[in-house]
Image (spheres, rainbow, N blue to C red):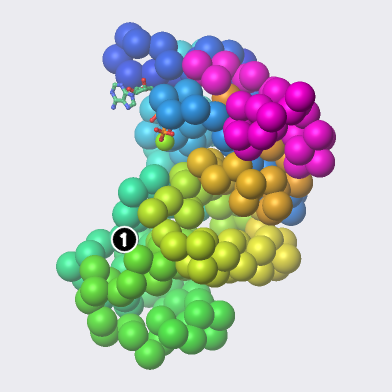
Amino acid sequence: MLSVQGVSAGYGRLEILHKVALDVAPGEIVGIIGPNGAGKSTLLKTIFGYLPPFEGTVTFENQTLQGRSPDQVMRRGIGYVAQAGGIFADMSVHENLVLGGYSLKSARAVNAAIEKIYAQFPRFRDRSRQRAGSLSGGEQRALAVARTLVISPRLIILDEPSAALSPRLIEEIYGTLADLNRSGIALLIVEQNVRRILDSAHRVVVLDMGRNAFAGSSDELRRSDRIRRLYLGEDAG
Ligand SMILES: Nc1ncnc2c1ncn2[C@@H]1O[C@H](COP(=O)(O)OP(=O)(O)OP(=O)(O)O)[C@@H](O)[C@H]1O
Ligand SMILES: [Mg+2]
């Protein structure tokens, strides 16, 4: 459903991604791992339209995405949860959800979508008037994910959903993501927590210095000596 081919991109004239390729099939969970500075966030920003690629193509459900704005990408059915935040701390939970639907035409459609989200995440109904910044870290992360659901995305891309969360909250957010995936939403997840993503993803892509380094099923990566040595801190002896 999502296909990234030969994409080079960066900031100004500085090229960070060099001919990167990546695919996500409908209903699939794909992980992206790689060292700090590898270009993982840059790749997500390029897919979502924050950065125009220097070359290459990004297509979603056979429609061209490159050259489109984040707003247009979102309207085509992709949600995005950025690396930090993704919520408006000074606004209420409800206002955050309303803003998630700013690209929907009618207020009625937004309200219907939010009603569905409250059914799925009852705790946000109870806290709808609470200032989003006063939610716990795990709740804020869940709200950032819930916000993307207002537009009924078929794919959500997430940049380090587990960052700075306790092990319990990491399991909670990944439980939420598993539920969304079971409901048919494909996920593309950048993750530092390699063990965690290997447990959730069907396939994992490794980026290194802006290039595709390695890709395979989670099982294949777990068996790879190189991955175990570099990313799982195991002696692959
Ligand atoms: N706005 C920017 N302007 C210029 N260079 C940038 C900008 N954002 C990121 N970079 C550079 O692009 C490279 C890749 O950054 P990116 O944020 O994509 O890495 P990452 O793989 O997401 O790293 P991390 O795991 O630390 O989040 C880095 O060298 C970074 O300094
Ligand atoms: Mg990053």
Q: Where residue 236 sits: x, y (%)?
A: 74, 28
Q: 198 or 116, which is in the foreground?
A: 198
Task: Decide: few, some or many residues near mark 1? Use Cα within 10 Å; few <14, some 14-19, many ≥20.
Answer: many
Side of 8 relative to 147 (left or right):
right
Side of 224 relative to 69 (left or right):
right
189 to 139, vertically: above or below: above
What residue is disc 1 on?
A: 87
Q: Please indicate, yes or no, whether residue 95 appears anywhere in the rendered image.
A: no
Q: Is residue 161 magenta?
A: no
Image quadrant holding the N terminus, namely: top right
Q: Where residue 90 sits: x, y (%)?
A: 18, 68
Q: Where residue 149 sits: x, y (%)?
A: 51, 65
Image quadrant holding the C terminus, namely: top right
Q: Please indicate, yes or no, whether residue 113 appears anywhere in the rendered image.
A: yes
Going by the numbered disc 1, the residue's amino acid type is Ile
What segment is highlighted magenta in the picture?
A: 208-237
